[in-house]
Image (cartoon, rainbow, N blue to C red):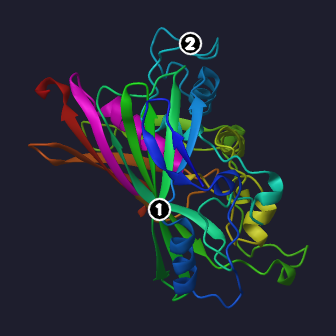
Amino acid sequence: MTVLRSALGRQTRPLNLRAMSRPRSLSTSSTTTASEAASQMLHTFQDKTIVRKQTLDGNQLQKLCLTLGRRYGLGPQLDLTLGCPPAGTPVPPGYHLVYFTPSELEEDLGADGTDRTFNAPAPFTRRMWAGGQMRWNDGTELRVGEQVEEHTKLLSAVAKKSRDGSEMVLVEVNKEFWGERGLALVDQRSWIFRKEIDLSAISSSSTSSMPPIPPPRGGKSEVRDVIVGDNALPDRVFKWSPAALFRFSALTFNAHMIHYNESWTRAVENHPGVVVHGPLNLINMLDYWRDVHRVEGSVLEEISYRATAPIYAGEEYAMSSSKMNTDYGIFEVLVKKGDQVCMTGHISEASSWSY
């Protein structure tokens, strides 16, 4: 065991360096129950905080903006097709997700391509991002060029039942991002782990009985604002191409095959097409708030969000919002595919003028 001290002079908890460098080995069995898997996680990661450092480079930020189709996403005078943003450029809310990406070797990835840090033990190896919460500190935003520390710890691991009665493990982790001006962001993430699929039982020629999702018209992604009825504010309509999803996977170093391998996602996971990333729609929610709702003097404070249904490449879906409280800046954002709600978000803002 050792003690790490941050560049800002804070002393962190004792760490097991082996746990930082690769996934810990948990005792596993095909008969392990969800309760047993949750208990093993709590025992393995109890009182451990993993600390990573990274200098936030402009290249990642530029490439994310281009993937989102936001050529001037960092300011009207900065054309991101011509170059990277300069040092000191603030990182927009949610865009930190392209930093501190997984660092495992391919041999350490799960069968579905997911990294296994803070993962439940077998047989609960199928991970899905279920939701979470982010909170920002005004005046301490992350910026291009600064060295940042990410502090990650396990908050909870709980046995749950899915709608069909099958066992799963709900895992929550907490990430703090410390920049040169102090704590900038607290990012709490909720993951669901379901039982692994027996790949030996799947024929190499088997395919899902579901029809494939038609590809986007012209093979390109679409993002546009539309006015619906008498609404004063627009809905934002999205359609993502497989190429855009591949780019987002590459930026986040996410090898989860449901986002780019249609053979896997149809034959193994029983999806009709490659899946749009939950974190991608989280960023879209925050961009929508910035574009549509933010006014001079307002400061983003918090977002809580929950994914409830998948969206696939080539599908059109819409994002809309409403103010939930007339006295406070609290907004509800809905992501819907037709009448089906696929993701919900609640955004809180504060006025910087009150500080």
Residue reaching furthest left?
327
- Horizontally, residue 91 falls left or right of residue 56, namely left
Percent from the top left, x then y, of residue 284?
46, 41
Q: Is residue 297 visible?
A: yes
Secondary structure under tag 1 reads loop
Q: Is residue 82 above or below residue 193?
A: above
**Which residue in the structure is indicated by mark 2?**
79
Nearest the viewer among 167 and 289 is 167
* Front residue of this view, candidates 258 and 301: 301
Are dots 1 and 2 in contact, CB under 8 Å? no
Task: Inspect this view and state whether residue 337 appears.
Answer: no
The one of 196 and 155 positioned closer to us in this rendering: 155
Tag on residue 47?
1
| Residue type, label 2 | Asp
Residue at 79% x, 51% y is 105
The residue segment tinted magenta is 278-305
**Element carrying mark 2:** loop
Marker count (numbered) = 2
Residue type indicated by callout 1? Asp
Provide residue 102's location: percent of width, then percent of height.
Answer: 66, 48
Q: Can you give x and y, in whole percent of width and height, for residue 233 in the image?
A: 28, 37
